[in-house]
Image (tube, grey):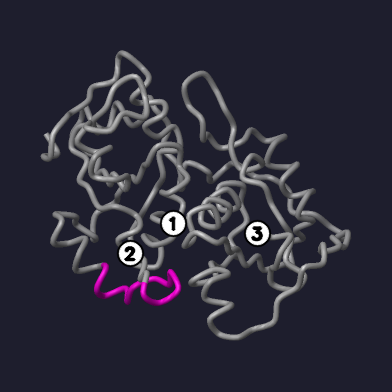
Amino acid sequence: VYQQLHIPHALHLKPKLLVRHEEQASGLLPDELGLQALIEYLQISPEHHVVAYDDEGGAWAGRLLWNLHCLGFEQTSLLNGGIHGWLAAGLPTSSEQAVIKAADTLVQVDLGQSEKYRVKYDLLRQMIKEDSAQLWDCRTFDEYTGLRLAARRGGHIPGARHFEWSTALDRQNHLKLHPLERTRQNLQNAGFQLDQPVVVYCQSHHRSGLAYILGRLLDWEIQAYDGAWSEWGNRLDSPIITGELPF
């Protein structure tokens, strides 16, 4: 799609640069070298403001922004509606390969605050044991209940409530986000407490990339479990729940 048309001067980024594979987990945050390679590829300087978009409603774009937040760079925005919204507005496009201009100074990776944005497996297990985690499963309902398998075992993390990521998208309006107040009400109706911290997950922290951004837009204190169900469901020692209820 990028080769056919894109926003003028937009850089093309392959999703594989955003994730690290480790045993069962397929969507982990890259290590420091991987994140530095991401910065070097995009040539992000401390003075830049990164605007991310995609063609699917914002999942991969949100994942990019989450990576940047984890490495200490927060001057970011998500283009609402992505390329679909851009085209609908009649704005110009290009089919030319963008030339990356070298930045004088690159952003330095600083993972010192990364735990503000992510939760690892062991910590999440402890949070569940202490009943101190509010969990948001943003996969499909069939994945949540365990009807559809995408790992050794199906189901959801104990206590997780379900709200599919794409529910926040308006398919009649070029995949733009529904009004935030509508989504806030829908989340509350699903049992979420938006005044309490939440951990979001999907299968590989792809779809939850948009859910993470959505949480921030709602002023929700949100972290992502990037091990996601690919890690949790493939491990044989993880507690799981099947069916429609959190527990």
Per the image, the residue denoted by label 1 is 210
Hey, what amino acid is under mark 3? Answer: Val
Closer-to-camera residue (19/8): 8
Hey, what amino acid is under mark 1? Answer: Leu
Question: At 45% across and 42% down in the image, what residue appears?
Answer: 205
Q: Which residues are magenta?
A: 172-183
Residue 72, above or below 226: below
Image quarter hosting the N terminus:
bottom right
Per the image, the residue denoted by label 2 is 168
Residue 129, above or below 48: above
Q: Is residue 185 left or right of residue 38?
A: left
Give SS at disc 3. Answer: loop
Give SS at disc 1. Answer: helix
Q: Horizontal and vertical percent for residue 142?
A: 24, 40
- Calculate the distance from the C-alpha at mark 1 to the C-alpha at mark 2: 9 Å
Give SS at disc 2. Answer: helix
Circle 1/circle 2 CB separation < 8 Å: yes
Question: At 77% across and 68% down in the image, what residue appears?
Answer: 95
Q: Horizontal and vertical percent for residue 14?
A: 67, 47
Question: At 27% across and 68% down in the image, what residue appears?
Answer: 183
Q: Find the residue positioned furthest to the top.
A: 236
Circle 2/circle 3 CB separation < 8 Å: no
Instruction: Say which quarter of the image contains residue 137.
Output: top left
Q: Earlier in the sequence, mark 2 or mark 3?
A: 3
Q: Find the residue positioned furthest to the front.
A: 4
Hey, what amino acid is under mark 2? Answer: Ala
Q: Horizontal and vertical percent for residue 129?
A: 21, 27
Circle 1/circle 3 CB separation < 8 Å: no
Of the two numbered discs 1 and 3 in the rendering, the one whose residue sits closer to the viewer: 3
Q: Horizontal and vertical percent for residue 48?
A: 72, 67
Q: Residues within 10 Å of mark 3 (few under 14, many from 20)?
A: few
Q: Residues within 10 Å of mark 1 (few under 14, many from 20)?
A: many
